[in-house]
Image (tube, rainbow, N blue to C red):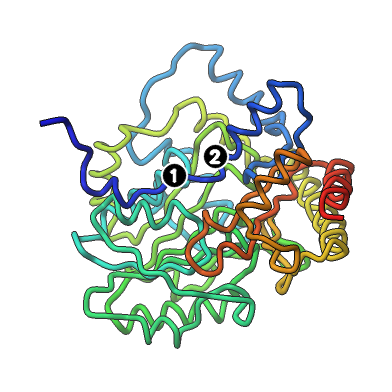
Amino acid sequence: MAFQPARRMADIQPFHVMELLRRARELEAQGRDIIHMEVGEPDFPTPQPIIEAATRFLANGDVHYTAALGLPALREAIARFYRDRFGAEVAPERIVITPGASGALMLALAVSTNPGDEWLLPDPGYPSNRHLVRSVEGRARALPVDAASRYQPTPGQVGSAWQAGTRGLMVASPSNPTGTLLTAAELAALHAETHARGGVLLVDEIYQGLTYGVPASTVLAQPALAAADDLFVVNSFSKYFGMTGWRLGWLVVPQCWAREVEKLAQHFFISASTPAQHAALAAFQPATLEILEKRRHEFAHRRDTLLPALRELDFGIATEPQGAFYIYADVSRLGGDSETLARRLIEEAGVATTPGLDFGDNAPRRHLRIAYTTREARLLEACERMRALLG
C-alpha cells in the first residue's frame, strides 16, 4: 500500500497568498515590475538598533539555547513594556517567547484543546487559525461577521453559536484581513460570555501598536481580565516592531497554565531563536520606539491615501480600518469574482493582491485584501494600473 498522509491533511488548505507571492516572484524573474500589496509584511527594514544588538551578540559567538520559556531579560522587557505603554501588570513568568506568533498560537491551542473540541472563529479571519485548530484535532467553526459589527463577533452571536463541545473563542484586535478593532468594553463582554460557559478566550494582538486615530491597547490593561485564568494573549515582534524574518513572538498565559505550556515549548521548539531574542531586547529602547512611531504615522498616511483612491475605482469599503495595514474591499461592482480579479491584476497590471478565498467562506469571492505595505508613490501607481485595466 502506498504511503498516505494523515487524514487531517485533507482539511488543510494551501495559504493562497503565498501561492500568489510565488507567481509574483516568477513574473519578477521574467523582468516584470510587480507592486506588492498581497503579503502582510511591512516594507521597512528592521530598525537599526535591533540589528546592532544582534550584531553585538553574534560577535562573541556564544550562541546557545535559551530556556524553553525564553530569555529572562526579554520576558522582563515585555512585562515592562506592558506596564509602561498600557498600564498593564503582567508578570514575566506568564510570558512565553515563541518562534513567531504562529508558535504562540500552536502552544495556546495545544495546551487547551482536546480532540473534537470546537473553537469559534470570526469569518473572515486569518486563515492559519482554523488550520492550526485542525492540526491539534480540534474543529474550527466559523462565525460569519460583516460590516454591521465591524467584522467582529458579538456576545449574542457567540452565545447562540456555543455548543456542548465548544472550547473557546478566538478574536483579533486589530484584525486581519479587515483592520478593525475591539473596544475594551467589547472584549470584556466577549470574555464574560466565554467565561460563563466554561470556555477560553484567545486574543490575537499581533498588530498591536499599528492603530490610526485611536490609541494602541491590550486586553490585559483591564485588571479583571489580566488576572483571568481562561484568557490567552498572542503577540509578535513581526508587525509593529518590523522583525518578520526574525520569527519571534510571545504568548501571555494564565499563571496556572504556565508549567503546562512550558512542557509543550520544550518539546515543540526547545527554544526560540537565541540571536532573535537578543536582538529584540533593543525593540523597546526609546530610539527604536521613536523609529517605530514614525513608521506608524507613515502607515496612517498610506491608508488615508489609498482609501479614496480605491473608492474612486469603485471598490466598496464599508468599514474603514483602524489598525494593521489592510483594506478589505468589496469588488462585486467590478464584475467577476475576487480570485479571477486577483489573477488579472497580477498578470495584466502587475499588481499583487489577496483574494478573499484565504479568509474563510463568508462571501470570499466578493472581497480582496489590499495591503498598504509599500510606499505611497507605488500605491498610487498601483491604482493607476488598476484604473487602466478596469476601464
Q: Secondary structure at mark 1?
A: loop
**Depth order, front residue of 95/374:** 374
**342 sits to left or right of 105:** right
**138 sits to left or right of 127:** left
Task: Residue 152 in the image: state x and y as whole percent.
Answer: 55, 74
Task: Residue 211 in the image: state x and y as whole percent.
Answer: 70, 61
294 shown above or below 223: above
Task: Residue 24 in the image: state x and y as whole percent.
Answer: 66, 33
Quadrant of the image containing the C terminus: bottom right
Seen at 38% across and 20% down, the residue is 64
372 shown above or below 26: below
Quadrant of the image containing the N terminus: top left
Residue tagged by mark 1? 14
**Depth order, front residue of 238/78:** 238
203 shown above or below 108: below
**Depth order, front residue of 38/80:** 38
Residue 108, numbered circle: none
Seen at 73% across and 46% down, the residue is 345
Q: Amino acid at mark 2?
A: Met
Task: Residue 297 in the image: state x and y as whole percent.
Answer: 81, 53
Residue 226's image quarter? bottom left
Q: Are marks 2 and 1 in contact (CB under 8 Å)?
A: yes
Seen at 61% across and 57% down, the residue is 208
Residue 88's image quarter? bottom right
Residue 374's image quarter? top right
Residue furthest to the left in view is: 1
Q: Amino acid at mark 1?
A: Pro
Residue 18, numbered circle: 2
Seen at 70% across and 64% down, the residue is 331
Q: CA distance from mark 2 to mark 1?
A: 8 Å
